[in-house]
């Protein structure tokens, strides 16, 4: 069996790295993988994100859908988890797929090699397939419909007026050993929290990674219904 000389192998790899096809794929990958990288870094911090995880995952999913699904479809769909993202009718045309600014900068320089060519068609097909695969994985692996995470959304101060009492009672029964009277007391405090204007609650800066921790730490120092005056 003939063995390819090492220098030929190196040259072939070098030629591949210099090819437009590889450049397009690597440039697109650099753009397309930034959101999950940021998402992962966010959850590797020591700050608690449990109250925001559902919102964060849906935001990540919505961002990927926006890269290849027609915006009117996303806007008109109440539950984005139900979007038929594989249906080509719901997808953006090839020239509207979001591929990142670096790719857009490359197109004028290599327009003859990209538009109307087999390589160009394969690249855009790969982009479309990448987005479909990412959305498929997110729908299968992320806990979008987890009831407990939905109930814990009240921990995010931005949701405090929208959460329901049933969420609190379910959490009490799931994680605490409490009497009915104690649950009633918790409900009263929750209702008071729910109707408190934002300007009377501790400050909350959503750009701060540890904002939820800081908010509830401050909340624990406030007087409540059963506290001493």
Image (cartoon, grey):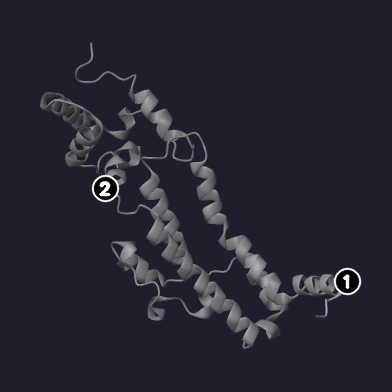
Above or below, 57 relative to 44? below
Q: Answer above or below: position of 141 versus 127.
A: above
Q: Residue at image x 38%, y 76%?
A: 90
Residue at the image position 30 percent from the left and 54 percent from the top: 145
Q: Which residue lies furthest to the top in this view?
A: 228
> Which circle, 1 or 2, is nearer the viewer?
1
The image quadrant that residue 117 belongs to is bottom right
Residue 157 in sight: yes
User: What is the secondary structure assignment of the residue under circle 2?
Assistant: helix
Nearer to me, 14 or 57: 14
Q: Nearer the viewer, residue 204 or 5?
A: 5
Relative vertical location of residue 209 with respect to residue 26 in this rendering, above or below = above
Q: Which of 75 and 141 is in front in this view?
A: 141
Horizontal arrangement in the rendering, residue 182 relative to residue 152 (left or right): left
Residue 80 lies left or right of residue 162; in this view the side is: right
Residue at x 44%, y 34% (from the top left corner): 211
Q: Can residue 67 be seen in this view?
A: no
Q: Name the residue under label 2.
A: 147
Residue 89 spot, x, y in % from top left? 38, 81
Quadrant in which the C terminus is drawn: top left
- Residue 45 on image: x %, y %: 52, 37
Depth check: give the residue in front, 58 or 72: 58
Is 184 placed above or below 51 here?
above
The circle drawn on residue 78 is none
Indicate the position of residue 219 as horizontal and vertical percent values. 34, 25
From this viewpoint, which residue is outermost toward the front? 1
Disc marking residue 7: 1
Which residue appears at 38% of the width and 24% of the height?
218
Q: Marks 1 and 2, Cα distance to the nearest angstrom?
A: 58 Å
Q: SS for tag 1?
A: helix
């Amino acid at each position: 069996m003939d063995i390819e000389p090492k220098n030929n192998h190196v040259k072939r790899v070098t030629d591949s790295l210099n090819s437009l096809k590889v450049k397009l794929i690597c440039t697109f990958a650099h753009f397309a993988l930034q959101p999950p990288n940021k998402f992962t870094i966010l959850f590797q911090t020591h700050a608690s994100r449990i109250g925001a995880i559902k919102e964060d995952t849906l935001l990540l999913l919505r961002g990927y859908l926006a890269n290849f699904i027609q915006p009117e479809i996303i806007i008109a769909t109440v539950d984005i988890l139900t979007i038929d993202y594989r249906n080509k009718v719901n997808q953006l045309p090839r020239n509207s797929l979001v591929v990142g600014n670096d790719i857009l900068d490359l197109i004028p320089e290599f327009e003859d090699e990209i538009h109307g060519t087999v390589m160009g068609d394969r690249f855009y097909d790969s982009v479309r397939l990448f987005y479909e695969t990412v959305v498929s994985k997110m729908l299968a692996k992320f806990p979008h419909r987890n009831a407990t995470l939905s109930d814990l959304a009240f921990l995010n101060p931005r949701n405090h007026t929208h959460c329901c009492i049933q969420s609190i009672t379910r959490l009490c029964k799931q994680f605490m050993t409490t009497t009915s009277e104690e649950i009633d007391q918790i409900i009263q405090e929750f209702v008071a929290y729910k109707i408190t204007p934002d300007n009377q609650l501790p400050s909350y800066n959503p750009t701060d990674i540890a904002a939820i921790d800081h908010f509830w730490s401050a909340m624990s120092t406030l007087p409540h219904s059963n506290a001493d005056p």
